[in-house]
Amino acid sequence: MEVTSDEVLIGRIASGDRLAMQVLFARHHVRVYRFVLRLVHDESSAEDLISEVFLDVWRQAGRFEGRSAVSTWLLAIARFKALSTLRRRTDVELNEETAEAIEDTSDNPEVALGKKDKSAVIRKCLVKLSAEHREIIDLVYYHEKSVEEVAAIVGIPENTVKTRMFYARKRLADLLKAAGIERGWP
Amino acid sequence: MNVVQKEAPERQEIEALLPWHAAGTLSRRDAQRCERALASDRDLARHYEVVREELHETIHLNESLGAPSARAMERLFAAIEAEAPPPRKSTFDLAGRISEFLSGFSPRTLAWSATAAALAILLQAAVLTSVVIRDQGGQNFGLASQATGDGTIALVRFAPQATVAEITKFLDAHKAVVVDGPDMQKGGLYSIRLAVTGLPKAELIKLVQRMQAESKIVEFMATKG
């Protein structure tokens, strides 16, 4: 069965096709939600944000030029909206420590290691990364974005993408080492 | 000096690409470069296993985040429904509007039947109008009053940039309704009824002048006569 491409759906959305909008939403909303949730750390806010992201798609579909994949466009919109939301949060001091405290509700890496669960330790350390490092690791590993696409989403040069990924992974290695896991890299 | 700078540029570059190689998002050329380097460099191959482990756990972590509730979709489509007209429908497409309006209420077959019926009515009106014009000696459009059995009819071509909302507001303001069109052979002219009865000539001229003054909406206008 041939699946309608995202680009074709965007063309239909531009002409006011609500069904095409539903298909695009069904296809991408979970990943966009997870990307946003990892940035804002609040499920309710993340749900509101994905509604706003797709509403922007509805309004701006006619301006989509197809220079990037639709999923890349969605993540770029989502990132912008998530960061705007974070900037508006004056009631909560959402620095890195706060963010970590929100997510880090179960065993710390050392305790998890005591349970001999290396996978759990790695995931704990992934959570403990800074927002900048978490973002790039998620985009590369989970959202399957190329160097060029990450550069477009985050708004940084391609070489900076590679450097940032290197330092994100190095920071992860440091956290794992502190938790007692030596992986032989770097 | 950091780890990156210690290594040879080619190996350093390959090492930097390993996360994308593991995710399968490199170009064919770069993927082949990575494969060749991994086949000949055991340290690099060990590093690649570390990358693959990170990839696996990152996917695991993200998949454990769950999915949004139905509230997100409900909120989105409520917002879309509240927005009228749909995006990029900037010109007045009467047949399209009729079809869309009917399809919103009924199954596809009913929508087709209703659209066909609407088009038949329009066709009938067009035939009657042409008969009236022919019976009057095939005159062209002028600025004289024309009271037919349908009331006072005028012909109008809307400006291309006029939106549906603007046209609707314009018609409402002048108590006019579209009764036919667009006639593509006459440059997209619509027939609009200005009054259900024949208007006095002076009143009609004033009305047409007022309507013509709205140049953002009206590109051309004349009464039949």
Image (cartoon, coloured by chain):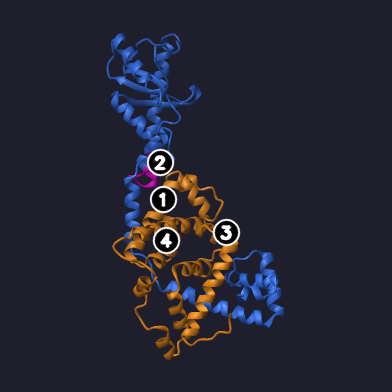
The boundaries of the magenta stretch are B103-113
Residue found 46% across the figure and 85% down from its top: A179
Q: Where is residue B206, by image quadrant?
A: top left
Chain letter for the residue marked with disc 1 in the picture: A
| Residue A125 magenta-highlighted | no
Q: Earlier in the sequence, mark 4 or mark 1?
A: 4
Are discs 3 and 4 both within one chain?
yes
The secondary structure that dominates the magenta segment is helix
Q: Are marks 4 and 2 in contact (CB under 8 Å)?
A: no
Q: In the rendered picture, chain A carries what hue?
A: orange
| Residue B105 magenta-highlighted | yes
Residue found 32% across the figure and 64% down from its top: A44
Rendered location of residue B113, percent (x, y): 38, 39
Label 1: which secondary element: helix
Judged left or right of residue A105, residue B35 is right
Residue found 37% across the figure and 29% down from its top: B121
Rendered location of residue B158, percent (x, y): 42, 26
Discs 4/2, front? 4
In the image, what residue type sits under mark 3?
Pro
Which residue carries the number 4 mark? A29
Which residue carries the number 3 mark? A157
Chain given the colour blue: B
Q: Marks 4 and 2, how far apart in space?
A: 33 Å
Q: Earlier in the sequence, mark 3 or mark 4?
A: 4
In what quadrant of the picture does the C terminus of chain B appear? Answer: top left
Chain letter for the residue marked with disc 3 in the picture: A
Which residue carries the number 1 mark? A56
